[in-house]
Amino acid sequence: MRQILLITDGCSNVGMSPVVAAAHARSEGITVNVVGVLDNNEEASMAGREEIADIARAGGGLSRIVHERQLSQTVQLMTRKTVVTTIQQAVNRELKQVFGADAIEELPPEKRGQVVRVIDDLGETSDLKVALLIDASASMKPKLAAVEEAIRDLMLSLQARSGRSEIAVFHFPHSSSGDDCMCDLDWTDNLTGMRSIIPKLQMRGTTPTGPALMQVIDFYGKGGYGRTTRRETDGISGDYVV
Amino acid sequence: MTTSFDIRLARGSVLTGKWKKGQYRVERLLGEGANGKVYLVEHLGRHYALKIGGDAVDLQSEINVLQSLAVQKKGAEPFLIAVDDFRHQDGKEYPFYVMRYVKGSNLNEFLHREGADWFPLIGFHLLGRLAALHEAGWAFGDLKQENVMVGEFGRVELVDYGGVTAAGKSVRQFTEIYDRGYWNGGTRTAEGSYDLFSFAVLCIQQFEGKRLLQLTQTLLPQNRNIEELLKLAAASPTLKPFNGWLDQALKGGFSSAREGAAAWQRLMYGPGVRMRRQKGSGWVKGLFTASMVVLAATVVWMFAEGVIPDGLW
Ligand SMILES: Nc1ncnc2c1ncn2[C@@H]1O[C@H](COP(=O)(O)OP(=O)(O)O)[C@@H](O)[C@H]1O
Ligand SMILES: [Mg+2]
């Protein structure tokens, strides 16, 4: 299972539409979740709200707007919920053949019990990758500590799973080079001993959310830096999700 | 994740199950949380609690746990009574299940109303509940004030099985301030020590709630740790006798909730009744022998009087 979690606090302003980029992700079998993060007495702008919801819808995922304080919990719950939903969608496809039903809700309670047992079991044991894409534009600077904390907290939750669980971390815009997005952390299942994940940054004013998303999709395709391209083989990712 | 779920059932309205056709008359809302609403209902002349949810998969996971537990303790009064769906006037269908109605109030309400004198006994009963769950191969997960119901004489029942997780898996649902991971105190793996950690925070939350809240708002995430929790415990007169116990629970020092319960029990009666003389002195030994003689005499007398039926011995 493959997810991208975008953490941002405003609107994109350069490059391709992030909604289109999210649709790309979805067609590659990657679910895109979006969290809009506000500092503790900030209000979200209307445009920001809409963009966040649109990206998540195109990416087949969830969106939430939360204050810094709720960030860790939101990230953790969203990731978990998306795992279940992804499996649920895959299972729904099989339901028709096995039980002649279109959705889990249509099954009588006993059969629903069996199906949900399978969903829960897969949710715990299947392999999972979450790429965190962090908006590091100027307004996000004071929130990055909360973001780091949320990443560590997510890793802790994932480590308790039985399945293989890895995260990678990216930020955008990439300050010096022409790249839109920078990989801070290649796929890993452990953050202990790591002092800081997102480096102290020179913040720039642009927010190239769409191009950054495209680069993360590309990174998924490459299987990480310096690795050869490989397709996921856990049976749940890929075409199932579309 | 909380899904937008805003069903309201009017007092007196009757729910009819889609599959089993059971009828449940709504009396009042008992409570609500992240996964659903719980109503007091009447069914065939008896009271039950009915939990109705927005997400069929989430609710079914909880039902699966309740069903596994029921299979494990055959013979006991069943907790889970029925599982069904309900079609609301709004045209949507909502899953629900019916369970035993647990009379009482939650831990916080109970202690406020009845007084902190009850706390040690309730803690002991709660540890017993947790131990039984652990011995059946589960961890409770989302232990918190709202999920602990206290009835007459400090009897304790756990409600909300949404966090209950098979041992060794990742805890399905938790609440930050009770979570071991949040305090940098260990993993989120479902195991007895995870619940004991939450139990310890629950104690602190109960008597130093304000300062605990303050701590969560001021401490940097990397500075959240067990020592901070222990400092709060040390400040509470009610928790004083339990400080050592809490230390051990937070640090994973008990091998099981059963062992934790036994240690708790030893603390409940304070420093204990003091003997006037040192053990082993001839005088005490003599007294002991004397009392045995009196006891034996009493027993013989009781037999003679028919107070104790022969079968008992
Ligand atoms: N069997 C029951 N008997 C009496 N009250 C209950 C029962 N189950 C739940 N409640 C009340 O309803 C509240 C919400 O139920 P709960 O199962 O905890 O929902 P959630 O999973 O959404 O948190 C509980 O905090 C408790 O006060
Ligand atoms: Mg609850």
Image (cartoon, coloured by chain):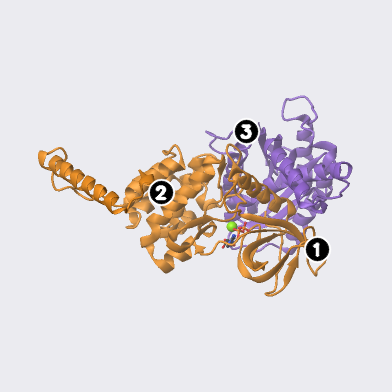
Most foreground residue, A167 or B41 = B41
Residue at mark 1: chain: B
Q: Position of residue A95 (x, y in %)?
A: 84, 44
SS at mark 3?
loop
Q: Position of residue A170 (x, y in %)?
A: 68, 40
Among the chains pictured, the one given orange colouring is: B
SS at mark 2?
helix
Closer mark to the observer between disc 1 and disc 2:
1
Callout 2 environment at 10 Å: few (<14), some (14 to 19), or many (20+)? some
The disc label shown at residue A189, or none: 3
User: Considering only order in the chain, which callout, 2 or 1, is on the residue closer to the N terminus?
Assistant: 1
SS at mark 1?
loop
Q: Position of residue A163 (x, y in %)?
A: 67, 34
- Colour in which the image shows chain A: purple
Residue behind mark 2:
B228
The answer to whether dots 3 and 2 both sit on one chain is no
Residue at mark 2: chain: B
